[in-house]
Amino acid sequence: MGSELFAELALVGGARGGEHARSRLDRELYGRGARSAGRGVELLKRPDRLLGVILIGNNLVNNLAASIATIVAIHFFGDVSGPAIATLVLTIVVLIFGEVTPKTYAAVKPDRIALPASLILAPLLRLLYPVVWLVNAISNGLLRLIGVRHLDAGADNLTRDELRSVVHEAGSLIPSRHQAMLLSILDLENVTVNDIMVPRHEIVGLDLDDDLETLLAQIRQSQHTRLPIFKGDINNIIGILHLRNASRFLSKPDLNKAAIVQEAREPYFIPESTPLHTQLLNFQQQKRRIGVVVDEYGDVEGLATLEDILEEIVGEFTTDVAGTYKDIHPQTDGGYIIEGTANIREVNKALGWQLPTDGPKTLNGLILEELESFPDAQACLQIGATRLEILEIGDNLITSVRCWQQGVRRRSSE
């Protein structure tokens, strides 16, 4: 009797552990034709019924075990001590054999529990279906009374933070580079185009106020594949010229500025607050690779490209002719000289630092915000674990800063 009771407890505990493990069940097995996986997927389509049959079986076995254990204990130990002994022993037995052990095993080896458990749960659900239906009808009615709608089993209910945890916990199952890419994708909604754009003062474009020879020289020597065309001021963007179309007009004997403008495509404008995951889809829908970032007043703030967004996912492309992190210059003493216009997020990525990114976008802006006044040359400050020494100032702009991490020993350069 005792061994049969233990077997029943382990069976139900394994089924409950198997249901817990199904959250990790590889559903690809179903597509490959695994019958047991197919049964598991069918059970998961109605989690309320699955949970109902498991709980009904669990309660039946627990109540049966309690009754039998009490009868046996009273027979051997009497009416006074018997119930207490039965309660103590049964609690330990259920905890070890019906809860902790099967659920732990199921969490470690989900396929070994979830798939065989479906062989038992599927026919058991058919056998107890009337009872399961009645229990679920009552419980679902109570849930509706308190405002809880029926859960759609087909929907994935993992939050972004839970997905992040899944990626972190995958460990060696996912290569580290792929893991970093997945985490970067999850972070796209926290980053806007304003964070990754080329600022307006760094935009290289064709000014129609320049003479024709100057424009042609820019086109021939440009390291970029697309150039904005504007007249007088960057806010007056007329179009975007793809340099692969340059051959169409460069060979024309009667070449003029109008011919250049004719080959340009109308500009595509992007609000500066657009999240990257949204803009990535917008680029796809609009069949664009570059957009003009504008603020709430319609003034041009910079340029954002599809490549900029992809670099947020996969890292810098080595084909960048201008070089990677050109604003950061390592020094022999262990520090860095960084240009004031450097993007803070780029600095953090390049050096592994944690400078704040929720305010100003450039190092110059961050220092001015921290000091709350325009500094004199050679001023020093500390932001978090980073020490900063202002080296050069020009045109109301901090142009050069020496930076190093606190705790990093600086070697003498003399």
Image (cartoon, grey):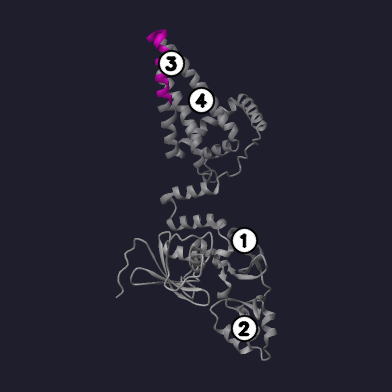
Residue 81 shows in the view: yes
Mark 1 secondary-structure assignment? loop
The answer to whether 13 appears left or right of 149 in the picture is left
Q: CA distance from mark 4 to mark 3?
A: 16 Å
Relative height, residue 385 to residue 339 (above, below): above
Q: Earlier in the sequence, mark 1 or mark 4?
A: 4
Mark 2 secondary-structure assignment? helix
- Residue 314: % across, % down: 49, 62
Q: Earlier in the sequence, mark 2 or mark 3?
A: 3
Q: Residues at badges 1 and 3 in contact (C-beta under 8 Å)?
A: no
Relative height, residue 14 to residue 292 (above, below): above
Looking at the rendered structure, which numbered label has been put on residue 274?
A: 1
What's the magenta region? Answer: 75-94
Near-viewer residue (199 or 109): 199
Looking at the rendered structure, which numbered label has been put on residue 58?
A: 4
Q: Earlier in the sequence, mark 2 or mark 1?
A: 2
Q: CA distance from mark 1 to mark 4?
A: 51 Å
Residue 79 within the magenta-colored segment of the rendering: yes
Which residue is label 3 attached to? 69
Which residue is label 2 attached to? 247
Circle nearer the viewer, 1 or 4: 1
Majority secondary structure of the magenta segment?
Answer: helix
Residue 231 within the magenta-colored segment of the rendering: no
Query: Which image quarter is the C terminus in?
Result: bottom left
Q: CA distance from mark 2 to mark 4?
A: 77 Å
Question: What residue is drawn where x is 54% and y is 27%?
Answer: 55
Name the kind of residue labelled 2 in the image. Ser
- Residue 10: % across, % down: 44, 27
